[in-house]
Image: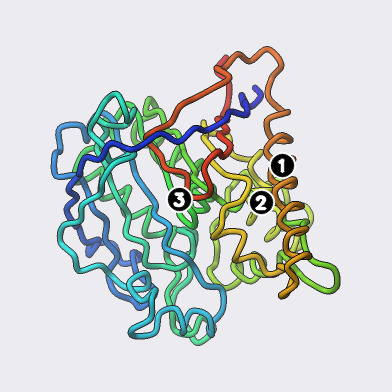
Amino acid sequence: MMPKMQLLLLLLLPLFSSTTKLLRRELSGYPDARCNDGTVASYYHQQELETAGSKVLVYLPDGGDCSSKEECSARCAAGSEDEAHCTSSRQEVIEREGGIWGSNPDKNPFHDYFKVYVHSCSSDSFSGTRDSSSLTGNFFFKGHNILTSTLQDLVSSFGINRASTLLLAGSGSGARGVGYNCDFVAEAMGEVNPSTNVRCLADSPDLSPWWVKREGECNSTQRVEEEEKFWGRKSDASCLKRVKQSGNSTARALNCGLWSNYWQDISSPLFLIGSQLDPESFASQPCLPRDDAKEIGEYEEAWRAGMVALYEAVAASAPKNSSLPSLLLCPWLPLRGTPGGLFLPTGRASD
């Protein structure tokens, strides 16, 4: 079986807002569900429970991350802008509006899903498995365990093992988490209900042209290597199996840590959404030119070209006999980057 893919143009339409209320549920019965500071992790679930046993949407938000003791200490310091993403949430009720949270069936294909929002508090793109120690700056990195515990609690408390469909979705660092965990969630749900259809959706993951960098010495992939060691990152199992023979930790980190290198290892149906220039992703690149407006302009042009080439290369692996619509309108999911991005459905074709 070959992946079924096609490159589509994403058009953003005005969003008609409707509010979804979500109630906090603490993962106190799961010892590995810990935020960076050791407090108990939590998730939020829709207060209407009727669809919990039918269709479920689990959302991983963009909470950012850190990859060194110094960076995490600054990120999680009292009063910092990102402090809330390092500790348990105390807000009992949150509201989400429009897009995938909307209730209008004409505007949102997920309007009747039981919705779950996993609080981001592990700074590891929902992939870490590491306990606190002096080597981690006394921070926990338990994002993968938080997601695992959330699924276990959803099964025991809300019976999502009866669901016909589960969608794992995420944006930014949460989209990275979707990549690392997509097949894991499919396998986990398959163990409790083999008939559950697990699909994944990633909005603005790190599917980016890592080879674009300024002249001179610059390691654009060093961070992803540091993350694997620092977080104890749990990557896609198929990718780890593919690169196991190399026995090289650097090769493993790069092959299984970057969407650009491991997308082909994900076997579950997957939607990728991205833009030629996501401002947040672009600005965070370690190899941006310094202070030279002309050089930055040339770099941006190369980046945009690299993004298009990357998505086209992925789409080129689609079976030639696949027939998908050439245009898809998606008012339900705002693109994190600039309007007019790329929409890429992928996955395994059925027999």
Rounded to the nearest whole Å, what is the CA distance between mark 2 and mark 1? Answer: 7 Å
**What residue lies at 36% left-to-right and 76% top-to-bottom?**
83
Percent position of residue 75, x then y: 45, 78
Rounded to the nearest whole Å, what is the CA distance between mark 3 and mark 1? Answer: 19 Å
Write down the residue under mark 2: 208
The answer to whether any part of residue 269 appears in the image is yes
Residue 33 relative to residue 10: left or right? left
Compare residues 30 and 77 and report the one nearer the observer. 77
Q: Earlier in the sequence, mark 2 or mark 1?
A: 2
Amino acid type, label 1: Leu
**What residue lies at 15% left-to-right and 32% top-to-bottom?**
50
The answer to whether any part of residue 244 appears in the image is no
Write down the residue under mark 1: 310
Percent position of residue 292, x then y: 75, 72
**What residue lies at 37% left-to-right and 67% top-to-bottom?**
121
Percent position of residue 15, x then y: 33, 38
Amino acid type, label 3: Ser
**Is 255 placed above or below 164 here?**
below
Label 1: element kind: helix
Report if the CB atoms under discs 2 and 1 are less than 8 Å apart: yes
Rounded to the nearest whole Å, what is the CA distance between mark 2 and mark 3? Answer: 15 Å
Residue 28 relative to residue 150: left or right? left
Compare residues 70 and 217 and report the one nearer the observer. 217
Label 2: element kind: loop
Label 3: element kind: strand
Outermost residue toward the right? 216
